[in-house]
Image (cartoon, grey):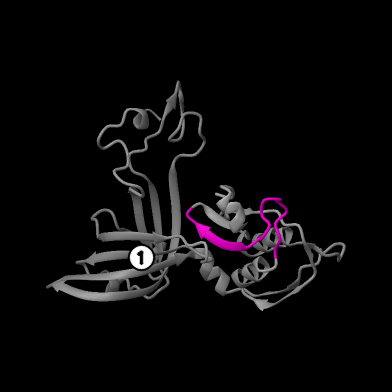
Amino acid sequence: NKNLKNPEEGKIPSFPGDYEILGMWLSSPNKEKGGYIDLQEPRVWVDLSLYEDIFSSSLTGKLQIADGVGLAETLPIIGEETVHINIRTKGIKKERSGDVEDGPFTGSDSTGVINIKMRVYKLTNYTKVNEGLFHYTLHLVSEEYIMNLKSKVRKTTLDPTTLEPRRISATIKQLYKQFFSRGRIAKKIFVEPTRNLTDIIIPNQSPFQAFNFLASRAVSAGKHAVGSSFVFYETVRGFFFVSLETLMAGGGT
């Protein structure tokens, strides 16, 4: 990227993790006609933090709000709201190859923009700053986590056609498609191939519990992953079912 080869102030990130918000909206089933509130114009958010953890099954976040219009009471915010965020690395601009507009690098298909949809599950630190202005924090979790809480897995890992034991990686793909791809555009999931066959029964667990249950029994098909300590986690780019050995070797990212 030419901005990285010849850096200029304002055209590259000023520090690792530096980002810019292209759009942020709050939608609520309590708002008439399914409308939304633009948190950018006028800007009412103060700080946004997103957390990725390889030992956590879902993305979490915190959004600090400076509310001068009584948003929490008039909407109201009760934990059914959805926050939509369009975000990209600061200073990364699109390239152009002739008449074709690429992503942040010449020839790339990606636009460089990450679209995140998260659910509000808690409101804390409600503080009065002055007359008519209040600060509070909205706690966020990925939408798939809420879907996960509403589902239960009661099935065996046997192949449904042949009733033969099958690889755990195949079971993970089938369960993810069943619970998170129905009638919607699902997030991507990276599943590392596993070697061992299994015929266990998943005992009435949520999908995320089932994924972690299977992760504790998975053995990687790769020769580099001798220990095969699998983890299931989410980043802003999707879900990952991968061994720690593969991550340390530079794969699965």
Identify the main secondary structure in magenta: loop
Amino acid type of disc 1?
Answer: Lys
Quarter residue 84 falls in: bottom left
Magenta-colored span: 218-236
Can residue 188 be seen in this snapshot? no
Quarter residue 120 falls in: bottom left
In this view, the residue farthest toward the top is 98
Return the x and y of residue 219 as percentages of the image width and height: 71, 61
Task: Give above or below for 34 relative to 238.
Answer: below
185 and 176: which is toward the camera: 176
194 and 171: which is toward the camera: 194
Residue at the image position 37 percent from the left and 66 percent from the top: 32
Q: Residues within 10 Å of mark 1 (few under 14, many from 20)?
A: some
User: Image check: 252 left or right of 163?
Assistant: left
Residue at the image position 43 percent from the left and 44 percent from the top: 113
Return the x and y of residue 9 as percentages of the image width and height: 25, 35
Q: Which residue is mark 1?
A: 62
Return the x and y of residue 5 as percentages of the image width and height: 36, 28
200 and 33: which is toward the camera: 200
Return the x and y of residue 213 as percentages of the image width and height: 65, 71
The N terminus: image quadrant: top left
Can residue 11 be seen in this snapshot? yes
52 and 95: which is toward the camera: 52
Magenta stretch: residue 223 in it? yes
Magenta stretch: residue 84 in it? no
Numbered-mark total = 1
Task: Give above or below for 73 relative to 189.
Answer: below
